[in-house]
Amino acid sequence: MPLTLLARVAGVLGGLCLLVRAAAGVDALRWPGLVLLALALAALGAGLVSTSATWLRAIVAVALPVLVWSVVEVVGGEGDGRVVDAVAGVVVALVCVRALVRSRGERHPAGSHSA
């Protein structure tokens, strides 16, 4: 299974974890959800850079999750942490779902039939 596929699935699962945490009040899902989102964001960040610049890919893979985390903290302010986490999780999950759908469309273009 390709690493990008695993990262996208991690993003969807992480977003769902944070959404369930906010809806059902299951605090045990916070850290698994945040870790899954961080992994998805790291892979997304690494994918933004050319494969020839490995050192830059590593820097961006660390920087993107930290940037998103800092923006969420600033936007969330003194608000309800569960709701802010859930919104951030849903946004990342939707980006990952979109990427999954797009990659599936590239593998199976319209009009082609697999036997």
Image (cartoon, rainbow, N blue to C red):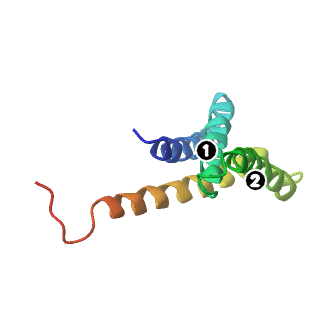
107 to 24, vertically: above or below: below
Across and down, in percent, residue 34 comes to 67, 38
The residue that appears at 68% across and 53% down in the rendered structure is: 88
Pointer 1 local density, CA inside 10 Å: few below 14, some 14–19, many at least 20: few
Residue 90 falls in which quadrant of the image?
bottom right
Farthest residue in the bottom direction?
A: 111
Front in this rendered view, residue 88 or 20: 88
Label 1, on which residue? 23
The Cα atoms of the two marked residues, 2 and 1, are separated by 22 Å
Q: How many marks?
A: 2
Front in this rendered view, residue 98 or 23: 98
SS class of the residue under badge 1? helix
The C terminus lies in which quarter of the figure?
Answer: bottom left
Across and down, in percent, residue 59 comes to 75, 47
Q: Amino acid at mark 1?
A: Ala
- The numbered dot on residue 68 is 2
Which badge, 2 or 1, comes first in the chain's sequence?
1
The residue that appears at 27% across and 61% down in the rendered structure is: 108
Farthest residue in the top direction?
A: 28
Front in this rendered view, residue 29 or 2: 2
Compared across the picture, whether 81 is left or right of 16 comes to right
Front in this rendered view, residue 99 or 49: 49
Q: Amino acid at mark 2?
A: Val
Pointer 2 local density, CA inside 10 Å: few below 14, some 14–19, many at least 20: some
The residue that appears at 52% across and 54% down in the rendered structure is: 96
Across and down, in percent, residue 72 comes to 79, 53
